[in-house]
Amino acid sequence: MRRLHKAFALLIVLGGAGAAAALYLTRPQTFSPDAMANLQGDAVRGEQVFRAGGCASCHMAPDATNAGLAVDMPGGIAFASEFGTFYAPNISSDPEHGIGGWSALDLANAMVRGVGRSGEHLYPAFPYASYRNTTLQDVADLHAYLVTLPADPTPSRAHEVSFPFNLRATLGFWKLMFVNEDWVVTGDLTEVEERGRYLVEGLGHCAECHTPRNQLGGMQRDAWLAGAPSASGEGVVPALTPDKLQWSELDIAYYLRSGSTPDYDSVGGEMVEVVENFSHLSNEDRNAVAAYLKRVPASN
Amino acid sequence: MRINKTIALGTILASLSLGAAHAQSVDPKLVVIDARQSFMSLVAFYSAPLGAMDKGSMPYDAAAASAAANQIVALTSLDQTGLWEAGTDRAYDESSLALSALWEPTADLNGKLAALRETSLALQAAAGTDLATMQTALASFNDTCKACHGDFKFKPPK
């Protein structure tokens, strides 16, 4: 009996140590406090980051109509998923309910590392799995722009997430499995194609909708931009791979500026907001997106 | 001879009843959906030269731009009332991509149609001026298409 007790105690100790090690390995990982010490933010450039990142599409008021012009960011748009319903938080400059009290480093930890200001893991409805490679200069510029936006006192709404996903510690494991800092499309890319990759794989977070997900909600990198069921359950998000999207680079860039398809049909659905955002970017950036898309592997 | 007459009468009656059956099978709401989609196809067709100039795949040509914009105004001058009759949405027939919500008062369908008309007139005035002026007016016109297609157009599975 005594031996059995000892074995049991050992098991508990080992199990506890294993759990502690696992929690340690999956702990929220923030930047070092001086990571952005030498960076100056530029609000004009920051607005370009804001549009490229599509921030307004999720964080504007639920009844706002134009993501390309919106400046009020009270949050509140609901995102239903099989894991629960997420509500975009207030990212206005309100110091209490928004992020007016955040430093640029706080913003970097949230966007790039998926860690909130209290050191908690954030849910990947916030697309940090895509923002992972955002440069800290871009974050500094974005921060400089965000503080110029009006304060909105609307409180953020708590997410409605079911067990076990309501335990934020589980998100550490999710990040370990599905947040990958490596680019998907690699090889000998031109400077323009690399810029396009930064916009598509990173800030623009195109893959969040256009790439299918596995059962735990991780993006399937081996089916990159191959099209996916719509998160809203309505229709299908089309593939962007060159075998399926056979538009010319000029057509793709023009669509992102005007919302017109090659046969002059008008953009529809969620892409209307994406186009509103992209219409504020430079021709160079839209051309870069088009150039990158031609380098994505076929989806078969 | 009498037999011939009977046959002739029978043929006439048969064709009349066939005609009646045919008339009954035409659903007026499907006619509206078809006409509305034809209207949008025509707008896209006459937008093509302007889009190509805007895109840069065709050099700007003031006369051609004006001609295209004139056709668009001819289309937006058509009475829209019948084309957007309530109840001709996707809930009624899947050949339509228009969601029922478009006919909710909050969707302001009439306001959206008025904007389509107004921006087409501005496009007509701008088209022959120069490329930049035409592009700005075309963007405003395109925005009135997106105003419906963003929230009120069904996304078909592909």
Image (cartoon, coloured by chain):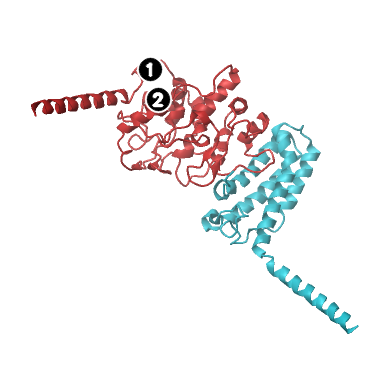
Chain colours: A red, B cyan
Q: Position of residue A79 (x, y in %)?
A: 43, 43
Label 1 vs 2, first from the N-terminus: 1
Q: Mark 1 packing: few (<14 Cα in 10 Å), some, or many (20+)?
A: few
Q: In this view, does B94 lie above or below A274?
A: below
Read off the residue under disc 2: A108
Q: Mark 2 packing: few (<14 Cα in 10 Å), some, or many (20+)?
A: many
Q: Which residue is drawn at 57% across and 33% down?
A: A278
Q: Quadrant of residue A86?
A: top left
Distance between the alpha carbons at the discs numbered 1 and 2: 10 Å
Q: Position of residue A135 (x, y in %)?
A: 46, 21
Task: Judge by depth and name the residue closer to the eye, A35 or B61.
Answer: A35
Residue ranking furthest to the right: B1
Q: Which residue is drawn at 79% across and 72% down?
A: B15
Residue type, label 1: Ala
Q: Residue at x 48, y 34 (%)?
A: A208
Read off the residue under disc 1: A35
Which quarter of the rendered picture does the C terminus of chain B lie within?
A: top right
Task: Judge by depth and name the residue closer to the eye, A294 or A41.
Answer: A294
Q: Do labels 1 and 2 share a chain?
A: yes
Say whether marks 1 and 2 touch (CB < 8 Å): yes
Q: Quadrant of residue A40?
A: top left
| Chain where mark 1 sits | A
